[in-house]
Amino acid sequence: MRTFLQVVSATRARRALWLVVVFAVAATLSLRAQDKPPAGKPADGQVGGLRFVDVSEITVVNVDVAVADRNGPIIGLTKDAFEVYQDGKLQDVSNFAVYSEEGPAAGPTPPVAAAAPPAAVPTPQPVEAAKREPLFIALYIDNENVAPLNRNRVLNRVNEFVLERVKPPDQAMLIAYQRSMKILQTFTSDPEEIIDALRNVKMYAGGRVSTNSSRKEIEEAITDEAKGDQNTERLYGLIRGFAQEQQVNLKFTVGALKEAITMMSGLPGRKIIVYVSDGLPMNPGLELYYEMQSQFNDPSTLAQSQNMQSSDLFRGLVTTAAAAGVTIYAIDCRGLDSELGTEAENRTARSTMAAAIGVQNYQDPLIYMAEQTGGRALINTNDVTDGLRKIGRELTTYYSLGYRLTPTGQDRLHRVSVKVKGNRDYRLSYRKTFIEKTLPTRIGDRVMSGLTFDIDDNPMEITLSTGESTPASGGRWLLPVEVRVPIDKIAFVPDGDQLAGYVSVYYAARDNEGKQSDLQRTDQTIKVPAGEYESAKAKNYMIGASLLLEPGTYRISVGLRDQLTNQAGYAVMRRPVHPEKN
């Protein structure tokens, strides 16, 4: 769900309810919003401002690769051991680092005997480990798609993972999904805070119990009907209803997971989601259609099942993760699920094929999400301890391979492939895609992340303040917002007998219930008479706006970018809107 946020112009209030217009005011400065800034590089005669950030020169793609064999992680490889491809083209690795918390690893164990010398394989050598970026780990418990007993068994092992892995500078948070996404514990480096929040999760109901019960009822109806009148049309109606309900639930589930991924997109460092559930259906109802195929031998059955194919949902999820730079580790809480369909709770045995298809149908999305984002899926195990240890090692023991990207000036998806020369036995974990982002997009990401997380990044020294909210139409309220920036932080260029500066301001808001606005952006031109600049630069420039909001308490996030220097600053604050209604 989203709330309404509009930036409203005082001069066009009657028509601006659904428009995005910002007005700026300053005592000694004038504004011409239609002016365009010069693009691409610092302009001649530039006055003031911070240093110029050349985005085209510093764009380096860093691919983090965990390499392991059956004995554990391999950390002694050199830069020359790797080949990195972007969109099928070999790249020149310019930046290389090895990260490890365990020190240099030994090389692979040589074979006891061999008929002929093996092919040349890069031999791991001791390499000094570099200081890695902080980790941001989001534990995401999907209560809507898990059975409580399965979940609680896994969470006991997750507690151990938290105690071992959550320590400064790394941070973890806890998210629970039950028809809506809730942050139960914000980012913290204290593992006890996460564990306390996990105790509360164990009390939540699990939505998969009801789903499993409905599925069993239909399976029993299929078996009974196969022995009786064989009214297949009624059965197909039951299956379609079940599949359609599951597809609706799946859309909400994936949407909430995408929201969690997106809100992490502006965070620095490495970003991880550990997704805990009983799996998600790639094709809702597929196992029931296979049950029908088994019982009635109807060749048209499986064709009907394709109407519920949901692979596009998961492709969209992976693309969102690529855009946010988030890696997904998925845990299937069901453990060693029977593929025979003879569980004690079933009144009659299911088709072995249908049972096996059901397991695969719910695991395939977990495997796909994990592999495509550089993580791993823990499936078919009643004890995830070993799998969580492997995840922990991958998070802290890996290679960083950097190559220069030639910017296209667009938000564009790229595909990445990494190989270790001469060795196919190593398991490589890395994100298979990434999205090249323009600077405005990256700034927008930071502003949206500021709705949830505190981001200390404000070289522009902007400040944020609000006035008293006033009633507007439709039960909404106008909240005045003022963004101030020191004049001497803004770069100016000559424009006749004046100096001109150019800034972009980004706004977003989120209420206590988790509803948030879309990102809003406005571009502003600041004019200063050339002869008054020395006195003006000691002052602040104020950009004023009114946000159209429903009653509630909001976290407001703002970013300001200097278009001449590409420098940006960020600020957040919390404010009630129409507090007597809160």
Image (cartoon, rainbow, N blue to C red):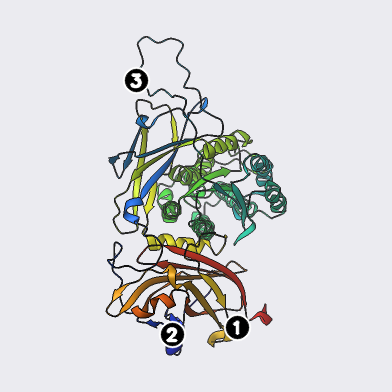
Mark 2 or 1: the one toward you? 1
The disc, 2 or 1, on the residue closer to the chain's N-terminal end is: 2
Contact? badges 3 and 1 (CB < 8 Å): no
Query: In x, y percent, where is residue 266?
Result: 48, 57
Q: Element type at marker 3?
A: loop
Label 3 and label 1: CA atoms lie apart by 72 Å
Residue 246 visible in rendering: no
Q: How many marks?
A: 3
Label 2 and label 1: CA atoms lie apart by 20 Å
Query: In x, y percent, where is residue 400?
Result: 43, 39
The disc, 3 or 2, on the residue closer to the chain's N-terminal end is: 2
Query: In x, y percent, where is residue 273?
Result: 54, 49
Disc 3: which residue? 120
Callout 3: 10 Å neighbours few (<14), some, many (20+)?
A: few
Q: Is residue 36 left or right of residue 156?
A: left
Q: Is residue 237 left or right of residue 576?
A: left
Residue drawn 38% across the image and 53% down it = 435
Disc 2: which residue? 16
In the picture shown, does residue 174 fall above or below 390?
below
Indicate the amino acid at tag 3. Ala
Query: In x, y percent, where is residue 262?
Result: 49, 58
Residue 111 visible in rendering: yes
Q: Element type at marker 2?
A: helix
Q: Element type at marker 1?
A: loop
Query: In which quadrant will I find the C terminus?
Result: bottom right
Between 509 and 4, the residue placed more toward the observer is: 509
Mark drawn on residue 391: none
Disc 1: which residue? 468
